[in-house]
Every structure is written in structure tokens, then in C-alpha cells.
Image (cartoon, rainbow, N blue to C red):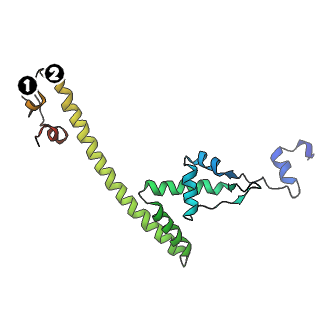
Amino acid sequence: MDPVRLPLAQLTDTLPDAPPAPERLLQVGDLARESGKTVRALHLYEELGLLSPHARSKGRYRLFGPEALLRVRWIGKLQEMGLSLSEVADLVRDWESSESAPRAMDKMRRLYEERLRQTREQLTKLLELERELESSLKYLSDCDSCDPVRSPVQCTGCDLHDCAHPAPELVLGVQQSG
């Protein structure tokens, strides 16, 4: 087939030793903007050994490769899981000093399993809180019909209108005197 009629993808595949696409390097400010972190946070990550520049520009600016964005997001996710930066640094040191890949993976798996268990416990508590808030809001919406002259101190129970359910703890707690 005539090279002029080849699709562009096939044409570039047939070129001998085509140079690779240039790697996109980011200055620290660009990395901060793309990751949603501050420049100060990225410098701290670097101080803790969590992040390393790929190179430096002629002006001595830190230049980070595309893997740095993934690394910063990973650090953020670990922080969302409740790990401190020093714990993340310990995790990285453990990973790098592991005797074997299976041992390193096992440490990560155990950490993630524990965090998953904790996350599920937290979700259960949040669902209970959601139900309590919904119940409290429903109860409190009935209070719109109360006597406007009545003092909140007099509201120790719902005696003015028919309530099928007792007040939730989020309502009762505020009604109780210290």
C-alpha cells in the first residue's frame, strides 16, 4: 500500500526509530494545582521522603514526572483513611525495606483490611446517626404547631399534639436540664 494512503496510526508505526513522546514534567506549582495540594504540602512530602523530583530545570526548579501525581493522590487517600504523614512515611520505608515483594504486599493487605474494617464500622455508626437525625427532624417538624408563647423549658414531652413515638435522644438531650 502506498504510504500516502496509510492511516496515520499505521504510518507512524512504519517510521523507523520514531522518537518517543516527550515526558511531561511538572513544576511543583503545577503538581500542586493538579493534585489539589499546596506547594508547602508537596515540599513536606519531599522532606519526609514520600516524593522525589524527577529532575531539576536549568533554573533549579523541581520537576516531577507523571508518577508524582499518582503518588500525591495515593498519599491523600492514605490520609483520608486516617494515617498521619509519619505513618505514611513508615509505610513507605517498610515497603522499600521488605525482604520480598510478597512480604511487602502482605503488609499492605493487612493495613487495607484493617482500614476496611474500621471504615465499615464508621459507616454503620453514620447510618445510625442518619436515622437519628431523620427521626429528630420528623419529631421537630411537628413542633411547628406548638403554642408560640410556650417556653422550650416547658417542652419535656409532646403533650400538645399526638406523637406516636417518643422524642429521639437528639431532642431529649437538649430538653434535659444540666
Q: Position of residue 105 (x, y in %)?
A: 51, 70
Describe the element under mark 2 as helix, strand or loop: helix
Foreground residue among 89 and 100: 89
Residue 164 against residue 29 in the figure, above or below = above
Q: How crowded is mark 2: few (under 14 residues within 10 Å), some or many (20 or more)?
A: few
Residue 129 against residue 78 in the figure, above or below = above
Describe the element under mark 1 as helix, strand or loop: loop
Q: In the picture, residue 81 is in which quadrant? A: bottom left
Marking on residue 145:
2
20 on left or right of 165: right
Q: Do the residues labelled 2 and 1 touch (CB within 8 Å)?
A: yes
Q: Where is residue 132 in the image (x, y as percent from the top left)?
A: 23, 41
Marking on residue 13:
none
Task: Work out whether residue 104 can be spotted.
Answer: yes
What's under tag 1, amino acid-wise?
A: Leu
Marking on residue 160:
1
Q: Where is residue 31 in the image (x, y as percent from the top left)?
A: 62, 50
150 on left or right of 33: left
Foreground residue among 22 and 121: 22
Foreground residue among 40 and 101: 40
In the rendered view of the protein, which quadrant contains the C terminus?
Answer: top left
Q: How crowded is mark 1: few (under 14 residues within 10 Å), some or many (20 or more)?
A: few
What's under tag 2, amino acid-wise?
A: Ser
